[in-house]
Image: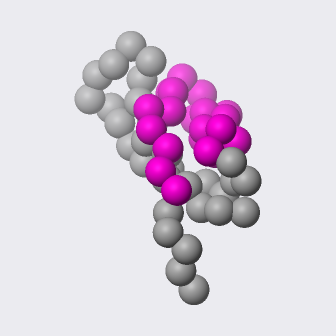
Amino acid sequence: MATYEVKMGRPSGGSGTFVVTVHASTPDQARRTAEAQNPGYKAQSVYRLPYSN
């Protein structure tokens, strides 16, 4: 599994954005996981973090 940062925001726009970190197999799974954990918010971008030990 990879680690992704997902930028979240209100579907209607606005300044209330934040970033969540999730572990997932694919970017789509990361987006769905972040949206499920934060009802009322939508994923705006998904970024895979580089691997590090």
- Of the 4 image quadrants, the one containing the C terminus is bottom right
- Across and down, in percent, residue 31 comes to 60, 38
> In percent of the image, x 55 and y 74: which residue is there?
51
Residue occupying the point 42% across, 23% down:
10
Q: Nearer the viewer, residue 19 or 52?
A: 52
Residue 16 visible? The answer is: yes
Indicate yes or no whether the magenta region holds residue 32. Answer: yes
**Left or right side of 17 for 27:** right
Q: Horizontally, is 12 left or right of 27 in the view?
A: left
Residue numbers of the magenta segment:
27-48
Residue at the bottom extreme? Answer: 53
From the viewer's side, name the closer residue of 8 and 4.
4
Dividing the picture into quarters, in which one does residue 14 lie? top left
Residue 31 lies left or right of residue 16; in this view the side is: right
Location of residue 32 in the rendering, given as x and y in whole percent from the top left corner: 67, 35
In this view, 4 is above or below 44: below
**48 w.r.t. 12: above or below:** below
Q: Where residue 25 appears, x then y in whole percent? A: 73, 53
Identify the residue at the far top of this view. Answer: 12
